[in-house]
Image (cartoon, grey):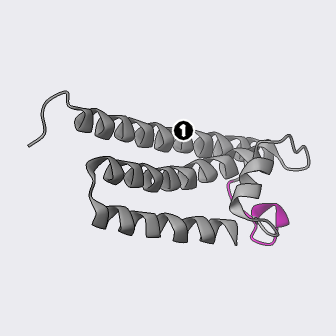
Amino acid sequence: MKNVGSGEEKLETAISYLLISGVALSLTLIAAGIIFYYLYYGNIGLSLTDQLMYIHGQDFFNFLWRLFMPDYSKPMAIQLMTAGMAVLLVMVYLRVIFSVVYFIWKRELWYVLITAFVLVVLTLSLALH
C-alpha cells in the first residue's frame, strides 16, 4: 500500500502531469496547424503527393533537431502539425525512460530488464529509421 505523499506517489504524479502536459501541447500544436492550414489553403484536404507531408532521409533524433531550426521552405501550418506529432512521439519515449528509472528505483529487476529492452528497441527504431 502506498503512503500518501510518499516518494513513489510523487513520482507517479509527476510522470502523469508530464504526460498530460505533453499530450495537451501536442493537441494544441496540431489544432493550431490545422487552423493555419485551413486559413492558408482554404480547406483541410491534405495532398499525399506533396513532399512536404513526408519525413524521409533522416532518423527521428536528427528530424527533431531540424524540426526546431528555422525552415522557411515549409508552411507554418505543416511545421506546427509536424511539431505536434513529434511531441506526441517524444512523450511515448519519455514514458519508457521514466518507467526504467521508476523500476530501478523500486528495485524490480525483472521490470527493469523488460523496460530497458523496450527502451533499446525503441531507441534503435527511432535512430535507424
Picture quadrant of residue 44: bottom right
Expressed as whole percent of the image width and height from the top left, the position of residue 8 reads 25, 38
Position of the N terminus, as image quadrant, is top left
Magenta stretch, main secondary structure class: loop
**Residue 115 within the magenta-colored segment of the rendering:** no
Expressed as whole percent of the image width and height from the top left, the position of residue 122 reads 54, 67
Residue lying farthest to the right in this orientation:
73
User: For this view, does 91 lie left or right of residue 54?
Assistant: left
Q: Is residue 92 above or below residue 80?
A: below
Residue displayed at 45% across by 70% down: 117
Binning the other alpha carbons within 10 Å of mark 1 as few (below 14), some (14 to 19) or many (20 upward) gives: some
Q: Which residues are magenta?
A: 44-53
User: For this view, does 72 lie left or right of residue 10?
Assistant: right
Instruction: Give whichever of 107, 69 is nearer the camera.
Output: 107
Query: How many numbered tags mark residues here?
Result: 1
Instruction: Give whichever of 77, 24 is nearer the camera.
Output: 24
Position of the C terminus, as image quadrant, is bottom right
Residue displayed at 79% across by 69% down: 56
| Secondary structure of residue under mark 1 | helix
Instruction: Give whichever of 115, 48 is nearer the camera.
Output: 115
User: For this view, does 98 lie left or right of residue 36?
Assistant: left
Amino acid carrying label 1: it is: Leu
**Residue 46 within the magenta-colored segment of the rendering:** yes
